[in-house]
Structure formats: structure tokens, C-alpha cells
Image (tube, helix red, strand yellow):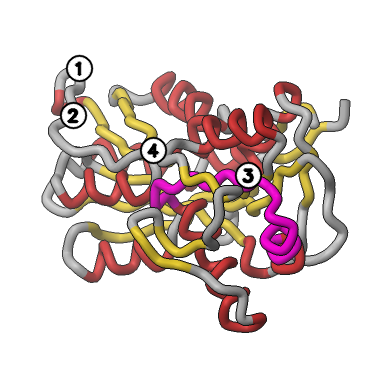
Amino acid sequence: MKQGPVFLALLFLTSFYSGCLSFDNDESMTVRLATTTSMRDSGLLDLLIDDFQKTSPYTVEYVAVGTGAALVLGENKDVDALIVHAPEQELEFVENGFGDDSSAIAWNRFVLLAPTGYNSSIFDAFESIYEDESCFISRGDFSGTHHKEQSIWRSLNQTNDVPMVEDADGYHPEGDWYYSIGQGMGAAINMADEKSCSTLSDRGTALNFAQQTSLQRTDFSDEILFNPYSFIFVSDMERQGAEAFLNFLLNDGQQRIEDYTIND
């Protein structure tokens, strides 16, 4: 089988969770991380943590949620650091004093998973889905992926006057063919496969699920689908361990990110 890259290294550089998290290890030697479900579901995060812990006295414990929920955990100071992928929301988080020193660590792209492939742009594909009322699964969890999906719908509204609504599920088309599930990437892919629907996914998770579903992946060249991942320190939280982990991600971890592939 052909090998497919999951993330590219930056060598030149669910529902909202509320309440307290419980981490088991000695807090002084534990990095408490909130990360995206796509980092977990791609399979890469566990490998990076394992590599880091082989040579570090620190232990990394994480909760995987959507970017929106991860930012809330940071605002509540339930974690020491974040790995997220929604640049506008990240900037607001830092500007509001909740986080420090955002650092890009990797990137991939968003792709469309659907019962059939598309040969046009992501905007044409979304417009076809709307016009045909083809079943679409939205994460609906205000994750980075959900924010990206909303930005595509918003662009269609602005350029082609495609009607949209804005409600508790975000900005989206209206119709019983559109499902907002409030869950992570893996759950969205599984539901799309079960119902023969389309869904927007990060490429890493799409590759990791490729052998488990019958959905076809379309890779578009549209600039809007660029998907950077950033590491952010949560203000006023334990910093030394988080700095050690970031240092690993920006150095030895870059080769692991660059080399990580999944059978395609």
C-alpha cells in the first residue's frame, strides 16, 4: 500500500468540556495537555509523547477535545498547555491574556470524505452538496475543523448567495440532510460512513480511518484548507514541563512528525 504523510513538520520555524480534570501523576512532573481529537485520532500524538517520555523526567497526560473545548479548558486553567488548530480563536485566546507564546509545530490540510470523489474546488463541492441536499455530517463542536467548515459555508453565502442560518450549531445550511453531531473527528467519520454522507476532516485522521470506511477522500488545492497546529502555554500555569515538551516537538519531534505515515 502507498504510504501517505499525515502531518508536515515546520522545520523552518465533542461537546464543550466543563469542570475540573483529574490527572493521576505527581503534578510537578506532569504536563497537563488539552489537544484536538484530530491529533489523537491520527495516531501521531501518542507516538510523540512516547518518544518524549523516553528521555524526559516529565510525563504528559492529555484530554482530546475540539479546539473550542480545549480553549475553554485553558481559560479555566485546567491544563498547562494546548495543541489546537483554529488560528483566529487562538489569537483571541492569547490577546485576552489566557495564553502565552503560540508556536506552530506542524501542519496538514483539510480534506473531504464522501461516498464519491469530487474534481472541483472545495467550494464547488460544498455547493453541490447543498444543491443536491446530500447528507452531510458536521462535527458541530466548534473545533478547528468545525470552524473551517463554517468558513467554507460562509464564503458560499457571500460569493454565491447560498442561504445559511446561524444558531446554536454554528453557521450552516438548513435542512434535514445536514447533521450536527457535537462529537469528535473519528465519530464524524464513522457516522458519515454508516449513513453514506460527506464530512470535512483533517487529512491525518482521514488517512488513519481509510481502511475502516468506504468513503472516498478528495484532496483539494484551495488555500483555505491549510491546517496549522499550534502549541500554546496557558498563562500562570506550570511552565517548565510544558517548555520541555515544546522544545522536543520543535527539535527531535520534527523528524517524527515528518516521518509519520499511514497506509493509504
Identify the secondary structure beneath mark 2: loop
Q: CA distance from mark 3 to mark 2?
A: 28 Å
Amino acid residing under circle 3: Phe
Q: CA distance from mark 1 to mark 2?
A: 12 Å
Contact (Cβ within 8 Å) of mark 4 with mark 3: no
Q: What number is the disc on residue 25?
A: 1
Q: Quadrant of the N terminus?
A: top right
Q: CA distance from mark 4 to mark 3?
A: 22 Å
Q: Nearer the viewer, mark 1 or mark 2?
A: 2
Q: Could you classify mark 1 by the number of other residues whose Cα lies within 10 Å: few (under 14), some (14-19), or many (20 or more)?
A: some
Q: CA distance from mark 3 to mark 1?
A: 30 Å
Q: Could you classify mark 2 by the number of other residues whose Cα lies within 10 Å: few (under 14), some (14-19), or many (20 or more)?
A: few
Q: Position of residue 207 (x, y in %)?
A: 70, 34
Identify the secondary structure beneath mark 3: loop
Amino acid residing under circle 1: Asn
Q: Position of residue 259 (x, y in %)?
A: 68, 36
Q: CA distance from mark 2 to mark 4?
A: 16 Å
Identify the secondary structure beneath mark 4: loop
Q: Which residue is mark 2?
A: 21
Name which of mark 2 and mark 4 comes first in the sequence.
4
Q: Is residue 210 above or below residue 12?
A: above
Q: Is residue 99 above or below residue 199?
A: below
Amino acid residing under circle 2: Leu
Q: Nearer the viewer, mark 4 or mark 3?
A: 4
